[in-house]
Image (cartoon, rainbow, N blue to C red):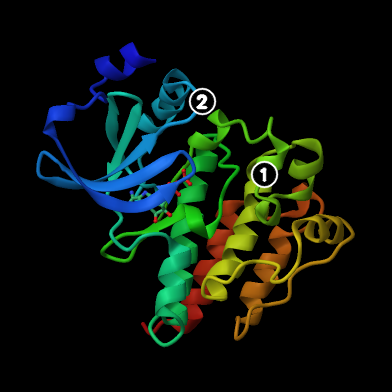
């Protein structure tokens, strides 16, 4: 995989990278802001027991993906571990973004835009037959021009969240994925429903005040979250469609996009 990346020009030159301060803390190491030949970038360092080789394999997947709603990979640097260099998403992750700004700053139309952005990114991933497995607002980043982009795609498979059940994000993972490890685009759709809930609640923790154990048992028995405060009824209906117990009954991302666009059309002037 290393050879492949080098051939394709994805191996970057460490000497051309200027590292700045830490802007985030990831599961596998710090995230830095920096500059690479004049472009502002984010640098994710990977220090964990997963081999750099395995990450390179996944990064190879990322190199094949390009979409306005996916955080763009610039390349990787191999230097005492792996550094993944991506475009800098100056406004950080969507959870913090919505929490810090809140209802007085972010309009409901903007909430629709973020939802649509993520949906379009997922539609693209689906078209590439890729399953994200960790779709959640914390993995959505906001650009300086207010576009929402999906990050962390392709990485989740390597860290084998499927092998390590303890690490599954219970509140975001579809029942069949939790119990039978059946991950699919339709399990991503379930997570997208939870993400919609996060967006329209301005970054609240899903299933507030419920323990993980309770969530899993209750959801399995048919319990679903209530609508966030002031959430448009049609958006809540979409969430509930995403949370159909039977994966086949959940809509696909193209359908979700259509429905979101229709709702937005009713609201935005012109
Ligand atoms: P992990 O998935 O390993 O937990 P993340 O990719 O979620 O790590 O990164 C952790 C945090 O670092 C994010 O929540 C975000 O605030 C920040 N971050 C990550 N990538 C970028 C980026 N490209 N631009 C700006 N901030 C980023």
Q: Is residue 201 visible?
A: yes
Choose between 9 and 68: the one closer to the eye: 9
Which callout, 2 or 1, points to the residue nearer the camera? 2
Residue name at image x 47 percent, y 83 percent: 267
Q: Viewed as shown, does residue 214 lie left or right of 135?
A: right
Which residue is label 1 attached to?
A: 168
In the image, residue 222 above or below residue 33: below
Choose between 59 and 120: the one closer to the eye: 59
Q: Quadrant of residue 65?
A: top left
Q: Viewed as shown, does residue 92 lie left or right of 179?
A: left
* Residue 99 placement (x, y as % from top left): 47, 74
Give the number of marks.
2
- View extreme (right): residue: 221
Which residue is label 2 attached to?
A: 49
* Residue 189 placement (x, y as % from top left): 64, 52
* Residue 17 placement (x, y as % from top left): 16, 36
In the image, residue 252 above or below residue 264: above
Nearer the N terminus, badge 2 or badge 1? 2
Q: Residues within 10 Å of mark 1 (few under 14, many from 20)?
A: some
Q: Viewed as shown, does residue 234 lie left or right of 58?
A: right
**Label 2 secondary element:** loop
* Residue 58 placement (x, y as % from top left): 46, 27
């Amino acid at each position: 995989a290393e050879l492949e990346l080098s051939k394709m020009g994805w191996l970057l030159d460490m000497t051309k990278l200027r590292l700045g301060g830490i802007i985030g803390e990831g599961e596998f190491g710090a995230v830095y802001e920096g500059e690479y030949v004049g472009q502002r970038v984010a640098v994710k360092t990977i220090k964990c027991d997963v081999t750099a080789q395995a990450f390179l394999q996944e990064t190879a997947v990322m190199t094949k993906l390009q979409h306005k709603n996916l955080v763009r990979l610039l390349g990787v640097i191999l230097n005492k571990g792996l550094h993944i260099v991506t475009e800098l998403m100056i406004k950080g992750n969507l959870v913090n973004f919505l929490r810090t700004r809140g209802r007085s700053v972010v309009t409901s139309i903007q909430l629709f835009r973020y939802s649509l952005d993520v949906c379009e990114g997922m539609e693209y991933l689906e078209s590439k037959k890729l399953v994200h497995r960790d779709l959640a607002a914390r993995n959505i980043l906001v650009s300086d021009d207010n576009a929402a982009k999906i990050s962390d795609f392709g990485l989740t498979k390597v860290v084998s969240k499927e092998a390590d059940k303890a690490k599954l994000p219970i509140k975001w993972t579809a029942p069949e994925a939790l119990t039978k490890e059946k991950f699919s685009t339709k399990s991503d759709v379930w997570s997208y429903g939870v993400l919609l809930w996060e967006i329209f609640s301005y970054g609240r923790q899903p299933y507030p005040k419920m323990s993980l154990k309770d969530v899993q048992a209750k959801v399995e028995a048919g319990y679903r979250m209530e609508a966030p405060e002031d959430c448009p009824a049609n958006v809540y209906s979409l969430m509930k469609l995403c949370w159909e117990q039977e994966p086949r009954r959940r809509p696909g991302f193209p359908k979700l996009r259509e429905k979101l666009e229709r709702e937005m059309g009713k609201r935005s002037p012109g």
